[in-house]
Amino acid sequence: MICAIVYHPDYLRHKTGFSHPESPDRLTAIMRRLDESGLLKKLILIEPNPAKEEDILLVHSKRYFETIKSAWDNGCTALTSDTPISEESYRIALLSVGGVLTGIDKIMAKEIDNGMALVRPPGHHAMPDQAMGFCLFNNIAIGARYLQKKYGIAKVLIIDWDLHHGNGTQYVFYEDPSVLYFSTHQYPHYPGTGSANEKGEGKGVGFTINVPMRAGTPADEFMKKFRNTLYDKAIEFSPDFILISAGFDAHRDDPLGSLMLTEASYAEMTKIILYIANTCCKGRVLSALEGGYNLNALAMSVEAHLRAMIG
């Protein structure tokens, strides 16, 4: 398999301040681990192009886009209490979305088989008109709409294995049967959404699947629920492309949660998804970094994920 990572050193220029968990050190730790392990030599390294305004407007309102664009110049240093910004955050947020879109373009052009966008700021909490949870623009949601608009992709499967429920992504597609949103997450936990009863509305009923996990859920129990719930639903849906909101904060060593996954868990989840992708959509899978705040656990888990992607 030809696997790529989409990365740009400017992702480090989104500054969140001292002691904030979503720091540039996260990407530095990942890239160091990939280099030291020798895995980096086996990956195609792709530099992203920034997203355009028209891409952002596939999901976000024009008013919200302008708010983010002008926030720093208007004296804003934080969009919410947990979402600080710095002078270059708007530009880097466009580059973060662009990382996902560039990865999609390379897969659709058959230049690579699959890949991971190592981006920040993350995205899955961002609502169409509201920042939250460290997120400015919803990278994955924009990616799904981009697939549909540019490439005519009919059905997209989004798998979100972050510790936290991707409330922004769920909201965007809650009434849309063309996108199947599947999420495993600690519940109840931030942001408070993601109960098993949240299944979609209107034509979208049944196309939102939440698998909430209690704090302390053992890895083997988590994996059983992940496998058994996802597989049949995904095969029935038969997606044309799979996107992963790849947060690694469900790791047992992560400081923000109480789930018990290991590096091996992420490798196993990746293999399950690749099997679905090879069955349904010519192996087309792109993951994008979301959470993960223990630097060593994050770096090791990303390595395990990418090794599984290579096969």
Image (spheres, rainbow, N blue to C red):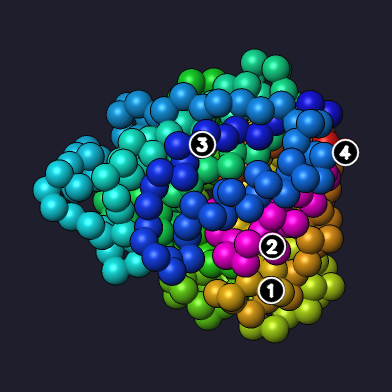
Q: Are marks 2 and 1 in contact (CB under 8 Å)?
A: yes
Q: Residues within 10 Å of mark 4 (few under 14, many from 20)?
A: few
Q: Which portion, as a residue range, is magenta?
A: 289-309
The residue at which mark 3 appears reads as 9
Mark 1 vs 4, N-terminal side: 1
> Which residue sits at x=66%, y=59%?
298
The alpha-carbon separation of the residues under discs 2 and 4 comes to 23 Å
Would you say 222 lies left or right of 240 here? right
Q: Residues within 10 Å of mark 1 (few under 14, many from 20)?
A: many
Q: Amino acid at mark 2?
A: Asn
Q: Quadrant of residue 182?
A: bottom right
Image quarter (top left, top right, bottom left or bottom right) of the C terminus: top right
Mark 2 or 1: in front is 2
The residue at which mark 4 appears reads as 311
How many dots with numbers?
4
Q: Position of residue 170 (x, y in %)?
A: 47, 56
> Which residue sits at x=46%, y=24%?
49
Mark 1 or 4: in front is 1
Q: Amino acid at mark 1?
A: Asp
Up the image or down, 180 lies above or below 55; here it is: below
Mark 2 vs 4, N-terminal side: 2
Q: Is residue 255 magenta?
A: no
Mark 3 or 1: in front is 3
Image quarter (top left, top right, bottom left or bottom right) of the N terminus: top right
The residue at which mark 1 appears reads as 253
Q: Amino acid at mark 4?
A: Gly
Would you say 282 lies left or right of 46 here? right
The residue at which mark 2 appears reads as 296
The alpha-carbon separation of the residues under discs 3 and 2 comes to 20 Å
